[in-house]
Amino acid sequence: MKESNFLKENNAQHMWHPMTHPQDSLDNPPRIITGASGVRIQDIDGNDVIDAVGGLWNVNLGFSSDPIKKAISAQLDKLPYYSTFRGTSNDAVIELSYELSEFFKPDGLTTAFFTSGGSDSVETALRLARQYHKVRGEPGRIKYLSLKKGYHGTHTGAASVNGNANFRAAYEPLLPGCFHTPSPYVYRNQFNETDPEKLAHLCVAAMEEEIAFQGANTIAAFIMEPILGAGGIIVPHESFVPMVRALCTKHGILFIADEVITAFGRTGAWSGSRLWGIQPDMMCTAKAITNGYFPFGAVMLSEQVVDVFENDKTGAAAIGHGYTYSGHPVGAAAAVACLAETIRLDVPTNAAKRGTQLFDGLEALKAKHDVIGDVRGGRGLMAAIELVSDRETKASLDKKTPIRIQDEIYNNGIMVRVSGPNIILSPPLIVTEQDVSDILSAIDAGLSAAMTS
Ligand SMILES: Cc1ncc(COP(=O)(O)O)c(C=O)c1O
């Protein structure tokens, strides 16, 4: 590896970073991460901190999962690549498809379509949803519904169902036929409703109204995250997802669960769908499927969707979709090992316990720091603090203060993520009680330091 001066001089000089202004990366060079082990990362200046971001919601088992590393390395030696396009398969992906069908049986999902990541998975689900209706003889079902504040990635299809202008406006016009309904965001909502259950009913009523307005027979699918992640950890009332599922069933609309973050234990359940007690028609997964060690994803399909495709006799179900890296043998080998480790470690149990500790600790910090307007989470290891300049009016902070807070928390030994007004926490699911306590202490100290400097 090149020496540290070279790396610092060239940092962000010859590449653009996602999700920021190019000039921002030049003015505020990104931290250079050079190593990691367990739940900790090391930077080029020798700082060693707990990664409370968990990579990017994906390194659920931490950075030292040897079985996954060994599986990747062994697969690279044996078969580093082969395609799964018509006519060929590979041993690793066949094994993975079997393991996933077993794992997702309680979600009613039997069959996988492999992708290279979360946006690919969303794109795949959206496309297959339209095709499903064409195969069934309802070709007019082409529209998509989704939630405002939802995040589904950045492909044009995914951005079109995204519910946040930051990921949309610069890239318009997006896909026609995408419509958004209110999300069950208790802290701020158009209904001024503070009761989570009442808000859930209002949001479902708005969705039903939109379905009636569009015409159910024009809508292919509804997509949502079981807990909205990048939009700021919006946890719906427990009645919400079952009501939405029922509404979709009633109107013949496919329910796509975007579980790119929530599958494999993050919510304290094995999947977000299981958390809420529903079965989706399709589920998008990626991220923790390989613990972030290899870009990979899978769309899981329900038996009923699979039946429609597999029973087609007209040729309409021929799949004109797929990626060079669909079913990549190295990714598949990584996923087989990762799934076995995820199950062996029973990560949802720890995620639930440590998630409660984290949420309770953040609530306690809210009592101490006026800059915390809202604390969200409480379902596994995904939590957010929404920062405000005034608790009464809920007015936002200036743009620089959250970054200053993030830096001060880092100086206290913890990496957190700032997204708009939110500090988002999604640590590895193997964090200990001490790790969570360290995360909370650093946030406390960081907030104090940033708000007095
Ligand atoms: C719910 C959800 N869907 C889709 C995506 C897109 O995944 P990727 O960045 O791997 O394309 C993300 C990424 O964070 C996500 O959180």
Image (spheres, helix red, strand yellow):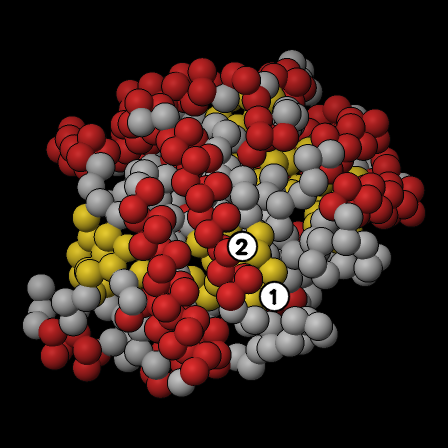
| Screen quadrant of the C terminus | bottom left
Tell which circle, 1 or 2, labels the residue nearer the N-terminal end: 2
- Residues at marks 1 and 2 touching, judged by CB atoms closer than 8 Å: no
Q: Residue at x 71, y 26 (%)?
A: 135
Q: Where does the image place residue 365, in percent across and percent down from the top left?
A: 49, 60
- Screen quadrant of the N terminus: bottom left
Q: Residues within 10 Å of mark 2 (few under 14, many from 20)?
A: some
Residue sitting at x 31%, y 61%: 414
Q: Is residue 417 left or right of residue 175?
A: left
Q: Which residue is mark 2?
A: 363
Give the number of the disc on residue 68: none
Secondary structure, mark 1, is strand
Q: Report x, y in % for residue 222.
A: 71, 40
The residue at 50%/48% (across/down) is 360
Quadrant hosting residue 125: top right
The image quarter containing residue 164 is bottom right
Circle nearer the viewer, 1 or 2: 2
> In this picture, is 76 found above or below 162?
above
Residue type at numbered disc 2: Glu
Q: Would residue 247 appear left or right of 107 to someone viewing this image?
A: right
